[in-house]
Image: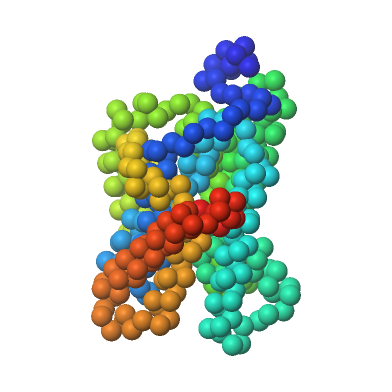
Amino acid sequence: MTSLAAQDSLPSIPDPHVRTGAASRDTAIDSMRGLAILMVIGIHSLQHPLSAGELAIDSVLRPCVPIFLFVSGYLTALSGKVPLMKRLKAAVIPYAIAFAAAYIYMALHNPAMDHRPTTTLARLVLAYVFVYYYVFVYIGCTIVLWLVFTAASRSPKFQTRLVVLLLLAILFGLIVGSYLDPLLSRLGFTESMIEEVRMRDVPFWFAFMALGTLAGLFAIKSALPDARALLAAAAIVTYGIYAGVRLFQLGDADYYDSIAFFGYAALFCLLLFSFDVESPFVASLGSGSYFIYLWHIFFVMLMRDHAPLRELGPAAASLITFAVAAAGSIIALLIVREFVPRRVCRWLGA
C-alpha cells in the first residue's frame, strides 16, 4: 500500500483488506455529534408554520444531518473500511424498537390509521414515522459508501480511484438534488409525496458523507485552523443565501436537497471540524446521539399533542418544547446507561 500511495501521490490510508482494532472514541468528533443532536431537537421544537425569524433559526440549524454524515465518512476514511453489517445492525435494531413505539403512539392518536401489512411494511422500510427519515438516509449512504470502497479496492491504484469516485458522487448528488423534484412534479406526484422523496434523497445526502471521507483521506484537519476566518466568512455568506432563498422562495427553496443548502451545510461542517472542540458533556451526548434522536421526538409530540403551548406564543412554545425534549431525552439516556444491561443499551442505541 505504501508503494501505491507513492505512485498515486496521495496521503496513505489503511488498506481496506487489513483488519484494524476498534478505535477509541474521539471526544472532538463526539462533541460534533452532540452539537448536531441538540440542533436536531431545536429544529423539531420550532412551531409551524414558521415565521421569518423562526425560518432564519431553522436555517441555521439545518446542517445537523450533514454533520452526522460528514463525521461518519471521516471516521470511515481513518479506518480504511466500511464494516457494513456492523453498522446496519447498530442502526436497524434500535430503529425497529423505536419504530414499534412510534407506531403505537401514532395509532393511539389516529383511529383512522391504515394498518394494512403492506402499508406498515412501507412505513418501516421508508422510515415513514415521526422524523425517522435519517435512518433511511444513513443506511442508504452507508451502503453507497461500502460500494464505493469495494469498487475502489479492485483497482491497484486504490486511493486514486476512491478519490475520483467520491468526487463523482458529490457531483452526481448535486445534480440529483437539483432535478429530482422537477422530474417528480412533471410525472404528476403530489407536493407532499415529493417532499417525502426529497427527504430521502440518498445521492444528495451521500455528498456530505463523501466530503467527510475526503477530509479524512487528505488529513485536512490540521490545516483547517489556518482557514477558520475564511471558512467562517464563507459559511455566513452561504447561510445568507440559503436563508434568503427559503424566505423569498427563489428557485429551489426547499430546505433539504438544494445546492444552496449543500453550500452552507458543507462549509458549516468544515468550520465546526476546524475548531476541534472537546467538551466532555457534549461528547457524552454525541456518543448517545442515536438514542436521543430516536426518542426525543416522543417528548416533542407529547408537548404538541397534550400541552397548551400555542397559547404562550411560538417563541415560548418552541423554547419550552426544546427544554423538555432535550432534558427528557438526556435524562432517559443517563438512566438507560446506568441501569440497563450493556447489550440492551446497544439495542436501544445508547
Can you give x and y, in whole percent of width and height, for residue 226 in the image? Answer: 29, 28
Can you give x and y, in whole percent of width and height, for residue 260 in the image? Answer: 41, 52
Say if 164 sits above or below 249 in the image.
above
Residue 252: quadrant of the picture: bottom left
Model colouring: rainbow
Q: Residue at x 68, y 40 (%)?
A: 147
Q: Residue at x 66, y 81 (%)?
A: 114
Q: Is residue 299 left or right of residue 158?
A: left
Residue 80: quadrant of the picture: top right
Residue 348 shows up from this direction:
yes
Q: Is residue 176 left or right of residue 212?
A: right
Q: Residue at x 46, y 54 (%)?
A: 338
Residue 175 shows up from this direction:
no
Residue 27: quadrant of the picture: top left
Query: In this orientation, which residue lies closer to the viewer: 208 or 75?
Result: 75
Can you give x and y, in whole percent of width and height, for residue 107 in the image? Answer: 59, 81
Number of numbered discs on residues = 0
Most extreme residue toward the bottom is 111
Q: Residue at x 68, y 44 (%)?
A: 85
Say if 195 sits above or below 304 in the image.
above
Can you give x and y, in whole percent of width and height, for residue 99 in the image? Answer: 59, 67
Query: In this orientation, which residue lies closer to the viewer: 267 or 30?
Result: 30
Q: Quadrant of the N terminus?
A: top right
Query: In this orientation, which residue lies closer to the viewer: 3 or 90?
Result: 90
Query: In this orientation, which residue lies closer to the viewer: 205 or 234?
Result: 205
